Image (cartoon, rainbow, N blue to C red):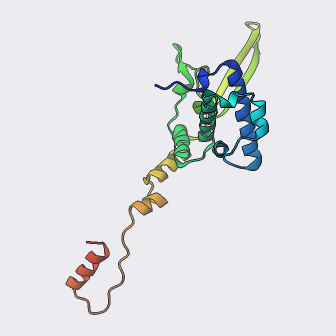
Amino acid sequence: MLQSAYRQLDATEKAFVDGYVRDLEREAARTFDRLSNALYRPIPADVVEAARGLLDRPLVTAAITERVNDLARDQEITRDRIVREIGGIAFSTLADYGTVGNDGMFQLDLRNVTPEQMARVESIEVEESFNPSSGGARKKMKIKMHAKLPALLKLAEYAGIVADSEHWKAANARPVVPSLPDGVTVEQAGDLYARAIGG
């Protein structure tokens, strides 16, 4: 397995790559351009001079390309990404966010939750109250997930399961047969229909 170029850099090189990529991100946001396009533009002379030779190192330029491509991929809005996001909401479970204790109660634990899993959470509420019997504070957390049913319906529509969806209509479309002229026999109508459907 190939090791990331960025992980092979020393601290100075990493600091340079991080700063350089941040500048590219800011410029892309300012000009409403795609971040990936920055890789195809010439590097300004003042940036080359300020880099003090770092841009001449193949590992540094590879790390810049790697980071820009990773960030651009994360920012791209594609059909696959949208379906993946909707699917994440549709098929998420509370088991991703905690465990059921011996007392049968769910215990929320967000320590190992991924950013993708956090994106499926609508809100988290923390309520603190004073417990007079123990003399300490009691913390109660509530997690609210994004609604599953709308996400499932969107996926069903996309998959063509819902009969009213455009995907279902396209997948189940029947050829339009022109109306037959007067006096056409049953055999002639059969031939015309067969030709209309490509038979």
Residue 149 visible (yes or no):
no
Examine the rendered structure and indicate whether residue 162 appears above or below residue 43: below
Name the residue furthest left. 187
Q: Nearer the viewer, residue 170 or 4?
A: 4
Q: Residue at x 61, y 19 (%)?
A: 111
* Residue 98 percent coordinates (x, y): 56, 22
Which residue lies most toward the bottom here? 183
* 33, 158: nearer the viewer: 33
Left or right relative to 119: residue 87: left
- As rendered, which of 139 and 57 lies closer to the eye? 57
Q: Nearer the viewer, residue 15 or 114?
A: 15
Residue at 58%, 25% (x, y): give it. 113
Q: Name the image quarter holding residue 7.
A: top right
Residue at the top extreme of this rendering: 134
Question: Residue 23: x and y, percent?
Answer: 75, 37
Locate residue 39, reporting x and y percent: 64, 42
How many marks overall? 0
* Residue 53: % across, % down: 71, 28
Q: Residue at x 68, y 31 (%)?
A: 55
Q: Quadrant of the C terminus?
A: bottom left
Seen in the picture, residue 165 relative to 115 is either above or below; the reply is: below
Answer yes or no: is residue 69 visible: yes
**Horizontal side, residue 31 vs residue 189: left or right:** right
